Image (spheres, rainbow, N blue to C red):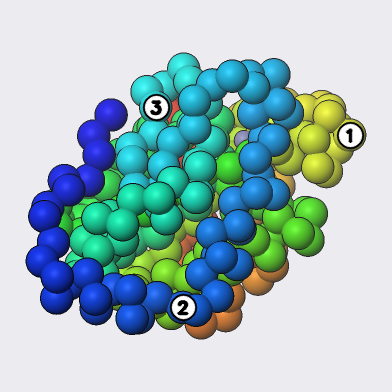
Amino acid sequence: MKNLHTKRGNGHERSKVSKSLPKDIKRFVSLGAVFDGDLYLVGHPTTQKVGPHEEPWETGTYSLTEWSKLFKTPQVLRRLKNQSVVLIFGCMDKRYAEAYYKFIRAKYDDDVIIVSIFVAGGIVQKDAKRAKALKEMAEFFNKFFTLKAVHASGHSGGCGGISHFEHQGKKVYDALGFKAFSNEEDEHISSRIKQSKKSSLPRQVWRKTELWLVTELGGEVIILFVK
Ligand SMILES: [Zn+2]
């Protein structure tokens, strides 16, 4: 896993960041707490979490984001302050997190920092508390950093988050009578992704947001532009 390079900041940079960060920083630090139990939903509670500034784990391992890690590493916040930030939202699913991250990463130059929020369901959140937490994370970046773009996604193939929050634990395709990775499932998830833009992202970032569906075709992960 590659971390951000921790360049030594001088005193000037340090004071610039501490001045511009909000007084109620504790509120922002606590936003990740609603997702803390997501690894229990998929039966992998001991998997290590990943900082928003770090790359997800390799395919085969769940990559739940530990949001608060960002605030425990001042050198990362300092570096974020001076660069453009691209924010990505996706499901922590072990099949897709890495592929989706790499797909987005490849769109930008190396000096653009990718901050990723991987939680169960990705951008698709029925629970109002969870949607609001994602919204406030995006607000945080839009307000205090230079937010270049937002990429928000959900995926087909029986997303565990959507199964848990929308279908009492049943796989999405079973609950709705579709086949996995069928056009019907992809269309259903795409429409949930479009609806979720409004509930999970603040209006101020909609114009810089692109929505993506992560799916599979013949065993290969494919990423489709939704809107
Ligand atoms: Zn999922």
Q: Nearer the viewer, residue 11 or 214?
A: 11
Instruction: Judge left or right: residue 218 versus residue 9.
Output: right
Tell me the residue that label 3 is attached to.
Answer: 57
Q: Amino acid at mark 1?
A: Gln
Question: Quick one: which residue is furthest to the front in this view?
Answer: 11
The quadrant of the picture showing ligand 1 is: top right
Label 2 residue SS? loop
Badge 3 amino acid? Trp
Mark 1 = which residue? 168
Residue 13 lies, with reference to residue 3, above or below; the image says: below
| Circle number at residue 22 | 2
Question: Which circle's residue, 3 or 2, is located before the other in the chain?
Answer: 2
Of 140 and 147, the residue lying toward us? 140
Q: Is residue 218 left or right of residue 129?
A: left
Residue 108 seen in this snapshot:
yes
Q: Going 28% across and 29% down the picture, which residue do you hit?
A: 1
In the rendered image, residue 163, in percent from the top left (x then y), is placed at 77, 34
Q: Earlier in the sequence, mark 1 or mark 2?
A: 2
Q: Where does residue 91 sit, x and y in percent of width and height?
A: 56, 40
